[in-house]
Amino acid sequence: MKLSLDALEALDAIDRHGSFAAAARVLHRVPSAMTYTIQKLEQDLDVPLFDRAGHRASLTEAGRELLREGRHLLAAAGKLECRVRQVAKGWETELVIAVNHLLPMAFLYPLIGEYYDRHGQTRIRLTREALTGCWDALADQRADLVVGASGDAPGSGYATRDLGSMDFVFALAPSHPLASETEPLASEVRAKYRAVVMADTSRRLPVRTVGLVSGQDTLTVPDLQAKLEAQLAGHGTGFLPEYLAREPISTGRLLRRRIVEGDPTEHLSLAWRSREDGRTAEWFRNRLLAMAGSLNAGWSQGT
């Protein structure tokens, strides 16, 4: 390897500070050392990096290209050094947080901003999961923390803490045949019509469905927004989070109908593998649990 970070740092300093002498002062080197570093780099690459014809050396086109790309390498090296120090102190290089499709993602952003301000070296990746997919993401190690896991954990090795609950309502378009049926709607009446369901994102664990009547026809959609849109279009009925259905019900674009069994409630948890002990994961767990009450109120209000 003919390039070195030391040489790129020298080249960068010369360009930023205007001369070899000024760069030497900033880097705490003698000018002769700076001159030797650049001359050695030019010899190794067999390319002139500075045009020395005038009173002041200026970068050649090749020198400008090396500096432009070299600054990316210097920045990456600096970030790598920070991450290595972070890892040595117990902070992960990356944390993957899976968020249940039922929850609006926006409530996490202030917390992520707080983390960046205080720490910021761990890369955060947000993903979406639905139904058993929340647990499957942990089991398959494609997520480190799940916000809004529902249902039972698939065996041992998981830790959970309660985040609150979410209320659902049975909703349909005003043009749907069930709109004229007598309430409360019995399951055998609902079974005659198609239900819109959100796809379970599980890859290995057995998938599950919620709110279906045995034998009922289904239209499967990829996410909660698509489910809302399909029900607004009259393509089927189904349960929606109350916060999501509130506005279209208030404006008459959806009708809320009572069912014999009563409106369901889904209990949501913060979940992680019980041996997960990284400091970033711990920071997010502690902050989410401390905010559980306000978070529950936030998604209940759709924010």
Image (tube, helix red, strand yellow):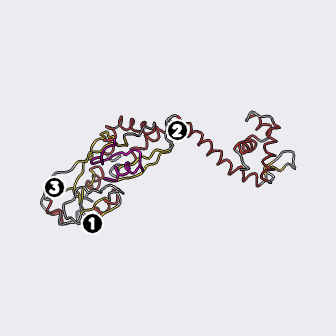
Residue neighbourhood size for the residue with mark 1, other residues' Cα within 10 Å, grouped as few (<14), some (14–19), many (≥20):
some
The amino acid pointed to by label 3 is: Ile
Q: Report the number of discs.
A: 3
Q: CA distance from mark 2 to mark 3?
A: 53 Å
- Confirm whether the magenta stretch covers residue 260: no
Residue 300 spot, x, y in % from top left? 30, 45
Residue 191 spot, x, y in % from top left? 17, 64
In this view, the mark in front (2 or 1): 2
Compare marks 2 and 1 and give the one earlier in the sequence: 2
Image position of 18 (left or right of 182): right
Residue neighbourhood size for the residue with mark 3, other residues' Cα within 10 Å, grouped as few (<14), some (14–19), many (≥20):
some
Residue that label 2 marks = 87
Which residue appears at 80% of the width and 46% of the height? Answer: 40
- Confirm whether the magenta stretch covers residue 148: yes
The amino acid pointed to by label 1 is: His
Which residue appears at 34% of the width and 53% of the height? Answer: 133
Q: CA distance from mark 2 to mark 1?
A: 51 Å
- Residue 64 versus residue 78 in the image, above or below: below
Which residue appears at 28% of the width and 65% of the height? Answer: 219
Give residue 259's mark: 3
Compare marks 2 and 3 and give the one earlier in the sequence: 2
The amino acid pointed to by label 2 is: Val
Residue 42 spot, x, y in % from top left? 80, 50
Dot 2: what SS?
helix
Dot 3: what SS?
loop
Dot 1: what SS?
loop
Residue 80 spot, x, y in % from top left? 59, 43
- Residue 138 versus residue 254 in the image, above or below: above
Q: Which residues are magenta?
A: 132-158
Which residue appears at 29% of the width and 48% of the height? Answer: 150
Residue that label 1 marks = 235
Image position of 285 (left or right of 7): left
